[in-house]
Image (tube, helix red, strand yellow):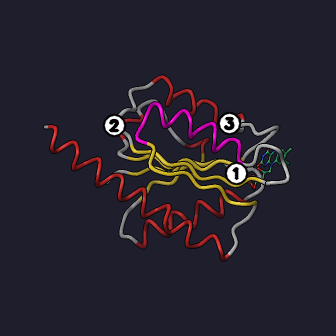
């Protein structure tokens, strides 16, 4: 199973969340490749079976500038066989809470097999743990389901 987690974080909240998500995959005996957006080579996205995106929200509900090339790569490459998921932190004091998660969600729903999205209020709290566990379970379930669908078709 080749899974990438690609994320961006300005002040550390999303990074902390992503490290938890990575740990939860490892607890399920699944190896994931973790990349900050600056390190990720996104010329061939379809080399991955699944990609998890982690993003904060900036401006007025916007995707961070540094995540836009990844967004466009999904729009323009052949990614129809990739399972995707989006997780993000935001602040509900702003009108568009986790707007960047919503933007990715709409695009990935159209272009990929979007499994799940998750929005976290600012920084991780104990109450978020069960939601993060479920997030990882759904990603893994979706990968297995999609694999079995591919086998039936072939
Ligand atoms: C200038 C600015 C604009 C922001 N705009 C939004 C927004 O529109 N929606 C939202 O949910 N959060 C917004 N936030 C909150 C951040 O997304 C939130 O603090 C997030 O946890 C930061 O993630 P990071 O620590 O990974 O950088 C904004 C924060 C700042 C400083």
Which residue is located at x 42 percent, y 64 percent? 137
Q: Give how far across and how far down residue 22 sits, in percent.
A: 51, 63
Give the crowd class for mark 2: few <14, some 14-19, many >=20 residues within 10 Å. Answer: some
Q: Give how far across and how far down residue 26 sits, in percent.
A: 43, 68
Cα gap from disc 2 to disc 3, whole angstroms: 25 Å
Cα gap from disc 3 to disc 1, whole angstroms: 10 Å
Give the mark toward the camera: 2 or 3: 2
Cα gap from disc 2 to disc 1, whole angstroms: 27 Å
Please name whichever residue, 64 or 148, is drawn nearer the observer in this view of the structure: 148
Instruction: Choose top left, top right, bottom left or bottom right for residue 64.
Output: top right
Q: Give how far across and how far down residue 65 sits, in percent.
A: 71, 34
Asked if the residues shown at circle 2 and circle 3 are in contact, with their CB atoms under 8 angstroms apart, the answer is no
Q: Which mark is residue 9?
A: 1
Kindly identify which residue carries mark 2: 81
Left or right, 67 with reference to 113: right
Asked if the residues shown at circle 3 and circle 1 are in contact, with their CB atoms under 8 angstroms apart, the answer is no
- First reached walking from the N terminus: tag 2 or tag 3: 3
In what element is the residue under mark 3?
A: helix
Question: Is residue 137 magenta-colored?
Answer: no
Which residue is located at x 51 percent, y 26 percent? 75
Magenta span of residues: 98-113
- First reached walking from the N terminus: tag 2 or tag 1: 1
Question: Is ligand 1 less than 8 Å from the beta carbon at label 1?
Answer: yes
Which residue is located at x 54 percent, y 32 percent? 107
Give the crowd class for mark 3: few <14, some 14-19, many >=20 residues within 10 Å. Answer: few
Q: Which mark is residue 66?
A: 3
Please name whichever residue, 133 or 14, is drawn nearer the observer in this view of the structure: 133
Give the crowd class for mark 1: few <14, some 14-19, many >=20 residues within 10 Å. Answer: many
Quadrant showing the N terminus: bottom left
Give the mark toward the camera: 2 or 1: 2
Q: Main secondary structure of the magenta part?
A: helix
């Amino acid at each position: 199973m080749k899974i990438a987690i690609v994320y961006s974080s300005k002040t550390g909240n999303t990074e902390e969340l992503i490290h938890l998500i990575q740990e939860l995959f490892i607890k399920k005996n699944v190896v994931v490749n973790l990349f900050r957006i600056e390190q990720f080579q996104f010329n061939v996205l379809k080399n991955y079976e699944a990609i998890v995106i982690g993003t904060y929200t900036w401006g007025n509900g916007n995707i961070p500038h540094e995540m836009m090339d990844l967004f466009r790569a999904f729009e323009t490459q052949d990614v129809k066989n990739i399972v995707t998921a989006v997780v993000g932190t935001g602040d509900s004091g702003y009108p568009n809470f986790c707007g960047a998660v919503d933007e990715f969600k709409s695009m990935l729903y159209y272009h990929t097999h979007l499994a799940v999205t998750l929005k976290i209020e600012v920084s991780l709290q104990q109450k978020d743990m069960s939601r993060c566990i479920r997030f990882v379970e759904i990603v893994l379930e979706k990968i297995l389901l999609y694999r079995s669908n591919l086998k039936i078709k072939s």
